[in-house]
Image (tube, helix red, strand yellow):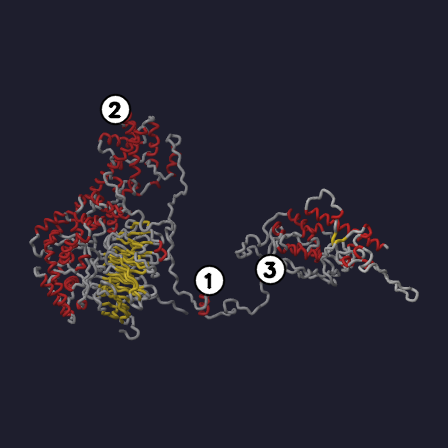
Amino acid sequence: MGRAWSLWKKVWGQLVGRVCRKQAGGQDSGERPKKPVPLQDQTVRDEKGRYKRFHGAFSGGFSAGYFNTVGSKEGWTPSTYVSSRQNRADRSVLSPEDFMDEEDLSEFGIAPKAIVTTDDFASKTKDKIQEKARQLAAATAPIPGATLLDDFIAPAKLSVGFELLRKMGWKEGQGIGPRTKRRPRRQKPDPGVKIYGCALPPGGSEESEDEDDDYLPDNVTFAPKDVTPVDFTPKDNVHGLEYKGLDPHQALFGTSAEHFNLFSGEPQGASSLLGDAGLNKGRKLGISGQAFGVGALEEEDDDIYATETLSKYDTVLKDEEPGDGLYGWTAPKQYRSQKESEKDLRYIGKILDGFSLASKPLSSKKIYPPPELPRDYRPVHYFRPVVAATSENSRLLQVLSESAGKAVHDPTTHSRHQLNASKRGELLGEMPVQGSATSVLEFLSQKDRERIKEMKLATDLKAAQLQARSLAQSAANSRARPSSPDLGHSPWHVALGGATAPTRASNFRPFAKDPEKQKRYEKFLLHMKKGQKDALERCLDPSMTEWERGREREEFARAAQLYTASHSTLSSRFTHAKEEDDSEQVEVPRDQELVSSQNDVTDKQSAVKMKMFGKLTRDVFEWHPDKLLCKRFNVPDPYPGSTLVGLPRVKRDKYSVFNFLTLPETTPPPTAPASSEKGPQLRETRKPSRWDAAQHEKKEDSISEFLSLARSRAGAPKPEPSPSVNTEEGRTPPESLPNKTGHSGAAPQTEGEGSRPSMDLFKAIFASSSESSSEEEEQDNSEDEQAGPEEAGFGGTQDSDTREAVSVAHAPAPAPPEPAPVPPFPIQKMQLDEREEFGPRLPPVFCPNVRRKPETPQKEKCKKNKEKHKSKKEHKRKKDKKKKHKKHKHKSKQKTKKSEKSSSSESTDSHDSESDGAGTPDLSPEELLRRLKCLPLPQQ
Amino acid sequence: MAFPEPKPLAPELPQKLLKTLDCSQGAVRAVRFNVDGNYCLTCGSDKTLKLWNPLRGTLLRTYSGHGYEVLDAAGSFDNSSLCSGGGDKAVVLWDVASGQVVRKFRGHAGKVNTVQFNEEATVILSGSIDSSIRCWDCRSRRPEPVQTLDEARDGVSSVKVSDHEVLSGSVDGRVRRYDLRMGQLFSDYVGSPITCTCFSRDGQCTLISSLDSTLRLLDKDTGELLGEYTGHKNQQYKLDCSLSAQDTHVVSCSEDGKVFFWDLVEGSLALVLPVGLGVVQSLAFHPHEPCLLTAMGGSVQCWREEAYEAEGPTG
């Protein structure tokens, strides 16, 4: 009966529950209905969609009979009556199930068939193992920690089994099985791994057990270790294997994975997740383990805090190679030395098969050191306060000026270290050493030095005047506000101090044109030097107006300042840049190199003479290589951003005529005559070639000289019999021939060349190569002929003849097989040569076999044709004709002689040339040699 | 008991005439070793370029295609191509094996005095009498030079190339070094027209010969004078100079028919090698052996050290 009642309760509860759920569902989906659902709408359906009807309080849930009738489809049929008299009807005991539908027997029915632990038998504590599994699942779940909520909601249950086990003495966390005598020593955490930050304390119970271990008596037994069942949960997500979501413990509290394991091994593990978190919160967070600071792509850092333990060492002798291949034995020497090379290998790394170690070290690339900073370089500039000099702050002033590196030349306050060698010498009364190579100027002769000094003075004067003028203007402008003299001059007074030494002032006279003014200025300097503050006021002319005085005050001050600034000891070594000072000069933008070659070419020459190569002879320019060139050279583009190629800011204007016309010439030092002659040449266009040193000088001859020479020599058939090369080299010996004397006569004019540019210069500029040379070419030819060997190429047959003669002259000792006593004079040039205007020459060919070749090219080294002697023109023409004529003849001759021996051909050739140079006086080779020898060389 | 190794002997200078090649190509304007020193090139004034085995004296190939005399030639690092320049103002790139002209670069306004490959034979640098150095690209088909270095004020007589530098000597008396890596041009003034320049093999110095019969050894970085070598005669002609294989000696042609050797450090004259009566117009020092080639007139002489024994049949 009690059972029936309970069944009733259940049925009723189920029904009510269903209705409630249904209503709740409806409410969930929408707004709460305003009026109650009418009765006809309160329908219930079974799982097949059939309507269920309620049959009042007692019929709820049952579909009775046929469509809620008692009967069946066939109608109501009572159970068959069976008499119990003979045939006692077996008493059928009806169970409630007999009256139940199949749904009642389903899992959620009233009488489910499956065996389920009822709440009555549920343990009050949770299933430890299930919890663990759930925690694991939670860790891998997409949203970690989601099970925490379940833990709050789900009632804690434990199965009866737990209860039974507990009754038997089992405790959670222990394994099941017979107790052991002594618990295996717990694995200690690896001492090599140190844990920083808040490591969780080991589990409470275990820890206490551990601690007890040592002193517990032997009769105490221990339970076996709990075993976590293997989790066979199928993988139901799409994450990668072993993927773990963010572990809240690690993320929030910085505990590492192994801590988590310890943590979950605790009895209270899952249920107290948050509680533990709270615990952890109380501790300081910090770096934990190696998870910190190691990026995904980095390799793990070595644990620099690792401690040494014995366990890291082998305790067993193993058959392992010690590493040197010697197994502890001493080895013969070469074996050891072999070891050395292996060590090298090890340093480099493993060598692949087929490769061997390079025997030659790679040539090391040059490393360019960063530029050296000056010792007192400060990366930050700050402006020093200007302090007026008064008695009380004079010390401060001095300190300031010293730290600023400004030399305050007050002889009385000089410290020993502020003096340089020359000053010390002065103090000691020594005479300055004359021979010391402090300045290039000292190598010049007295006369030149004076000249330079004069010129410098002039330019200085001019500059100072300019400066003064502009200053005066600015002063006049600023004159609008009259300032008291004291205020006006005090700053510069301080700045100047005693900086102007009278000795220096004496050679700088900015007001030389106005002697009175200059006198005043010198007086002013003198006063300045004495340190009188009112120096300016004293030296000014009292008769001047206030305005004039003011202007002059400014001028003097600036002049004095300017002077001290521009005359450092260093500046005395260098010549002034002409453009800066010379106001009359046309301002032409200049190429860098041009400037350098012009300005200090004399300096450079002197430096070369003194063998002072290095800074003096070197120019460094910024140069932009082409990008493609860099690529081809496998070099990074030094100027990645620039589109420039070559030298920056090359101005073509430099070839302007005006440059040459207006440029004042620096007087070259006479000690370097050759180099001084080079000076103007460098400045010229690139056309003239300096291979022919002699022609410079010809070029330097004035045009009138040329003309007169030409006139005087018009009739002379052959002015130059000498084939000597050295004709060109300028220093013609006295016995040289007429046209040479012309050269030498021109030589003195080189001294004065600076005043006017030579005609050749203009020609070099204006005469385009082809036309101007056509006539000059011929001269050239003739000149070449006279000049001889350098012109002679080996190609031209007659040339080679002459060459032979010349080379004989050069190397006289062993006489050539057939020394032609004939001067090689008329040298035939080839047509191609006439086109060529300039260039270095190739050595002559002194080889007989060449001559055998009829087709030898005529190409000869040519000289510059610009420096032609006009006087030779007529000559030339004649000669040219002859030459051409000759050539043909000669060629045919050569062919016939092809097979001849070289010596014989040589002789015939020389005969040819002899006949060519019919007019030339015969010169023996000895004579030629003698002349050659006494010719000075131009470049030396 | 091991005795210390005896001090290595001073490198011997080539002074034994091993071979004379009669090139029969007119004047030999230049003689050059190939990259490993096994072969040599001779530039003839009869427009031909010849490839030789100098030790055996065998002519391997004749390259003809120049329109005028050939003034300089160089071989590429892989021996696969040659370049040459000459009086026809053209720079020619040759295929070694076939002997064909691969390319002809035209653009110079004057004779091409000197040609050089760069390290990878991708660029030919040619210095000409027109005072320019032109960088020709061997890789692309474009006919113009990649860059023209026209800083020289006069004809360029010598060009040398290192991995990132171009060293040029000009008749205007300046040595210019273009440093591609630093993007700078270093110009050293020597004064006298320069006939030949070369890098030392360690790349730290430059050797410069000029028409004042002087060779100068300059520090590459500072331009300071490290040594001066005189005694020979070079006043008119474009003559070659070189450093010996181990940078121990300085070698130069001379107009008096000799070749001069100086000790590089001491600057003392080490050897004067009489070659002949004419002018020694060109020379080439073997890249790593004491072997010297000199060109005089129409022939080339091959010199070895005294102890050298020719292996195999020579000639």
Element at label 2: loop
Residue labelled with disc 2: A543
Q: Position of residue A873 (x, y in %)?
A: 11, 54
Q: Name, please, the residue furthest toward the bottom.
A: B313
Do marks 2 and 3 share a subunit? yes
Can residue B227 be seen here? The reply is: no
Could you tell whether A725 is left or right of A717 in the image? right
Which amino acid type is marked by label 1? Tyr
Q: CA distance from mark 3 to mark 1?
A: 40 Å
CB-based contact (under 8 Å), mark 2 and mark 3: no
Amino acid type, callout 3: Leu
Residue at mark 3: A241
Q: Position of residue A841 (x, y in %)?
A: 21, 58
Crowd class of label 1 (few under 14; some 14 to 19; many from 20; radius 10 Å): few
**Quadrant housing residue A833:** bottom left
Residue type, numbered disc 2? Ser
